[in-house]
Amino acid sequence: MQLQFPPTLFNPRFLQYLTEVESSTEILFGGAGSSKTVHSAVKDVLRVLKGKNVLVVRQVYNTLEDSYYTDLKKAINDILDVGSEFTFKKSPLRIECSNERVILFRGLDDVEKLKGIACPVGEIDHFTVEEATETKEPSINQLQFRSRGGGERLTIEQIQEIRETMDKAMSLDDLTSLDRKKNIYELLGYDTKEDFEESGKTMTLLFNPVSTNHWIYRRFFCDSEGNATFHISEKVKHTPQLYIMHSDHWDNAFLTYDDHMRYESYRFINKYFYDVYSKGMWGVLGNIIFENVKLARFDDNFIANIPEQYVGLDFGVKDPNALVRTGINRQKKEIYILQEFVKGGMSTEELANVVQGFLYSKETVWCDSAGLQQITDLQIKGIDARSVSKYGGANFKPHGISVLWEYTIFVNVDCKTFAGEISSYTWKEDSKGNVLNVPDDGIGAEHQNTIDAGLFYALNQVLMQCKTSKIYG
């Protein structure tokens, strides 16, 4: 088929990327709403139409259908209008082209599942990593290793020589001739170390940047001494081995005035959120997660007149049970922590009585999904207790936090436990004191029961509605 499409279908900022770039590693990063993801999807479709197989990965497999799979369908049906050439399948996700090439989908939560990926014709030629900052470097290394194809089978003599060379080497840089005619790369079928590292397959990384402590920054954006090798002001870096393109919402010609103003308004809500998610800058995280918090005094009349209210429950085992009522005004971008109940050592009967007294008529209490037996016990008592959805697995809270940053959180002065917890709710640090993009609420951390109940559980349905918003695009 003729692979020519009017340039007006695409953002001018991405035309060079779509038509001229084919580097070994391609990095599209920057702010939300820039259209980098949908243009990556367009390019993947063009790759398949040209006879290549594509593997799309994300840290958690079950998030792909609502994200990149949907972007690919949009690229195929709405942008390129080549739907007649493709078939869409689920269980597992798969997109098949009439030329027998495919787009496959996998999760990096189980790298072993990457073994034995088979294409109807040929091998995987390209892989796209969505939300690459969710991934770990060893997983990407495994992905590259398992997808590497081509080359002839080694002889027994070559294998023995490789083993002897490896036994003497301390690092890849030590894999020189060692009194042999060929170095390790030649034995593997490559002329140089660079050819070995950059051979055959191509890869695209898509992400909104997070901390400069992230492995992606260290590997692609600075040298061995930590000096930056790419600055956002450059916008593009292009070599045969590496293509880096930065974009933000100002690069998206299809956004409206209101869209642009929404992204710009974040500068008045949370500086880190604005720098990273709107401007697409590499951030330097502070320890405190929520700076958008204010104490307030709510009387009964104020509480009664908040139309949208939810109740969350975090079950205590060694910790106290935490029951929190939360209100939200989506138009004003305000969250209200209205009431709390915190107590440990309670029987099922005692907890059920407290919950019944806490709820309004026919109200639901959203509970920690880890407490299925407790949820069942409450349901037997006639309480509409439901389990929350921890979408995204390990990224459930980071994603929720990015939505909550859009709001100002007002805490009732009577909710002293919540006020204390949120003021000390911090990011984790590694052994070197570097701040990580993970909330520190695990073993050894101060318990955050009311935060879980009042924000992540009570507002679970609100966060679910936001999880596929273009704010993450």
Image (tube, rainbow, N blue to C red):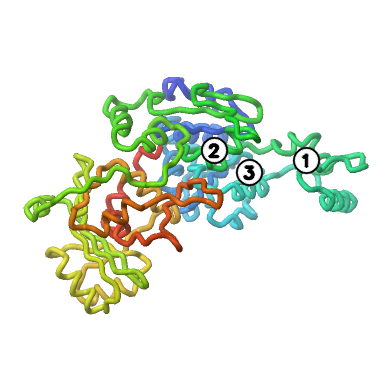
Task: Give residue 239's position: percent from left, percent from top.
Answer: 64, 25
Q: Is residue 446 above or below residue 320?
A: above
Query: Quick one: label 2, few (<14), some, or many (20+) residues within 10 Å?
Result: many
**Are the residues at dot 1 and dot 3 in contact (C-beta closer than 8 Å)?**
no
In the rendered image, which quarter is residue 353 located in? bottom left
The label on residue 13 is: none
Q: Amino acid at mark 2?
A: Leu
Residue 408 visible at all: yes
In the rendered image, which quarter is residue 238 located in? top right
Residue drawn at (22%, 65%) of the image: 341
- Between residue 403 and residue 86, name the one nearer to us: 403
- Between residue 465 and residue 71, name the one nearer to us: 465
Q: Is residue 352 above or below residue 178?
A: below
Task: Give residue 164's position: percent from left, percent from top.
Answer: 87, 52
**Are the residues at dot 3 and dot 2 in contact (C-beta closer than 8 Å)?**
no
In this rendering, the label closer to the viewer, 3 or 2:
2
In the rendered image, which quarter is residue 387 located in? bottom left
Q: Is residue 175 above or below residue 249?
A: below
Q: In the drawing, does residue 184 fall left or right of residue 148? A: right
Give the residue at mark 1. Answer: 173
Task: Give residue 316's position: percent from left, percent from top.
Answer: 33, 70
- Between residue 266 and residue 61, name the one nearer to us: 266
Q: Amino acid at mark 1?
A: Asp
How far apart in space, not on screen, are marks 3 and 2 (Cα)?
16 Å
The label on residue 205 is: 2
- Number of marks in the rendered image: 3
**Are the residues at dot 1 and dot 2 in contact (C-beta closer than 8 Å)?**
no
Give the residue at mark 3. Answer: 124
Question: Between disc 1 and disc 3, whose residue precedes?
Answer: 3
Query: Quick one: label 1, few (<14), some, or many (20+) residues within 10 Å?
Result: few
In this rendering, the label closer to the viewer, 1 or 3:
1
